[in-house]
Amino acid sequence: MKLKSTLLSLLTLSFVFSGPLYSAPKKKVDDPHQTAGGFFDLHVCNWPDRPLFFLALFSTTQFDNVASVEVVSPAGQSLGTLNLERYKVVKKKGKPEKRIFITQIPVPKGAKDGWYLGKVTLRNGRRYEARDRVLIQSMGRASNIRPAHESQNIPLPKELRWDAIPGAKYYKVYIRDLWNDGKLIHTSKFINTPRYILPKGLLQKDGWYAWRIHARDVNEDVELGDFNHGSLNTEANFTTKR
């Protein structure tokens, strides 16, 4: 269970921080997620083996000056604060270092649609309020995946498939090599169909692989953020012929 939890945690960081996500400075000036203190976003996540939860994120170059980031519901209820000990460091040439803080927060019973707040307090006393419009919806998880879970001794697949998920406009595929300590060997770019053509040479004969799909509704929406709701399916594994 500990290994499963660790792998899921690593995958969380991978799918949240991979690709062009959280490029807040490039967004519109009037983006309510962006403040002088940093960028706030809140996602509704449907993952296996757990209730629906919020994934709260705050991205900033002023990380040494952040005292707290509180998440507040449209009704004014405090849902919790971000864990400032959990973050991803982002370094880009010619730009200041950035940290992206991430925390999972349970979706409370009876949670409503509306504008959720990220109340940011800096150590110098300055306060900022970012807003994210959230629609409380549960996106279905990928099903009828091919190759199916525990497929054995199959020819090297050229593609991965699954049934389209209602409401999902973007998918991202993650592949791990189970012969190599479960190392994440591939993360796809965003695709908009439930089919992924595998890069040549990625998979090998006599291999043992695991894969899963992250689905999301939108990408970089001014009101809904980088995405509003998404899902992650249960990981599937398969072996390939010698």
Image: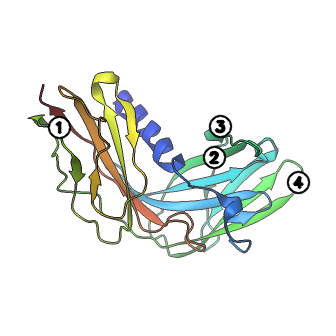
Q: Position of residue 112 (x, y in %)?
A: 50, 74
Q: Residues within 10 Å of mark 1 (few under 14, many from 20)?
A: some
Scheme by which the image is coloured = rainbow
Left or right: 7, with 220 as reference point: left
Question: Is 148 above or below relative to 10?
Answer: below
Q: CA distance from mark 3 to mark 2?
A: 8 Å
Question: Is 93 above or below relative to 79?
Answer: above
Q: Position of residue 106 (x, y in %)?
A: 48, 55
Q: In percent of the image, x 61 and y 74: which residue is there?
A: 75
Q: Secondary structure at mark 2?
A: strand
Question: Is 80 above or below relative to 75?
Answer: above
Q: Secondary structure at mark 3?
A: loop
Q: Badge 2 is on which residue?
A: 101
Q: Residues within 10 Å of mark 3 (few under 14, many from 20)?
A: few
Q: Position of residue 47 (x, y in %)?
A: 36, 52
Q: Nearer the viewer, mark 2 or mark 1?
A: 1
Q: Badge 1 is on which residue?
A: 156
Q: Nearer the viewer, mark 2 or mark 4?
A: 2
Q: Nearer the viewer, mark 3 or mark 2?
A: 2
Q: Does label 2 or label 4 sit earlier along the sequence? A: 2
Q: CA distance from mark 2 to mark 1?
A: 39 Å
